[in-house]
Amino acid sequence: MVVIKWINVLQPTPSVPIWQRNYYEHIIRNQVALHKTREYVQIDPQSWNCDQLHPDSPSKW
């Protein structure tokens, strides 16, 4: 929260969301994890059209 307040002080943007929803960090600890992460980064954009959060996708909730 402190970082968000600091950013909003530096920029005249009070109460503007800063972080992406549902974001999480992951530490890459070895070569296998690095390989899997690189593979995910390359393949994931291709699946965006099928994602339930895509704006053109009918809601599944």
Image (cartoon, grey):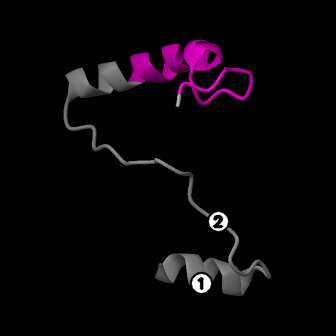
Q: Nearer the viewer, residue 20 or 39?
A: 20
- Residue 33, magenta (yes or no): no
Q: Which residue is painted at 72% across and 29% down in the image?
A: 55
**Mark 2 secondary-structure assignment:** loop
Which quadrant would residue 19 be assigned to in this image?
Answer: bottom right
**Mark 1 secondary-structure assignment:** helix
Q: Which residue is mark 2?
A: 17
Identify the residue at the far bottom of this view: 9
Asked whether, in this view, residue 40 is left or right of residue 42, the answer is: left
Asked whether, in this view, residue 2 is left or right of residue 4, the answer is: left
Q: Which residue is mark 1?
A: 6
Question: Could you tell me how many numbered marks the image carries?
Answer: 2
Q: Nearer the viewer, residue 4 or 30?
A: 4
Vertical position of residue 17 compared to residue 35: above or below = below
Q: Amino acid at mark 2?
A: Pro
Residue 53: horizontal and vertical position, in percent? 60, 30
Which quadrant would residue 46 be assigned to in this image?
Answer: top right
What segment is highlighted magenta in the picture?
38-60
Which quadrant would residue 59 be assigned to in this image?
Answer: top right
Vertical position of residue 10 compared to residue 47: above or below = below
- Residue 57, magenta (yes or no): yes
Q: Which residue is painted at 22% across and 21% down in the image?
A: 32
Dot 2, crowdedness within 10 Å: few (<14), some or many (≥20)? Answer: few
Asked whether, in this view, residue 18 is left or right of residue 28, the answer is: right
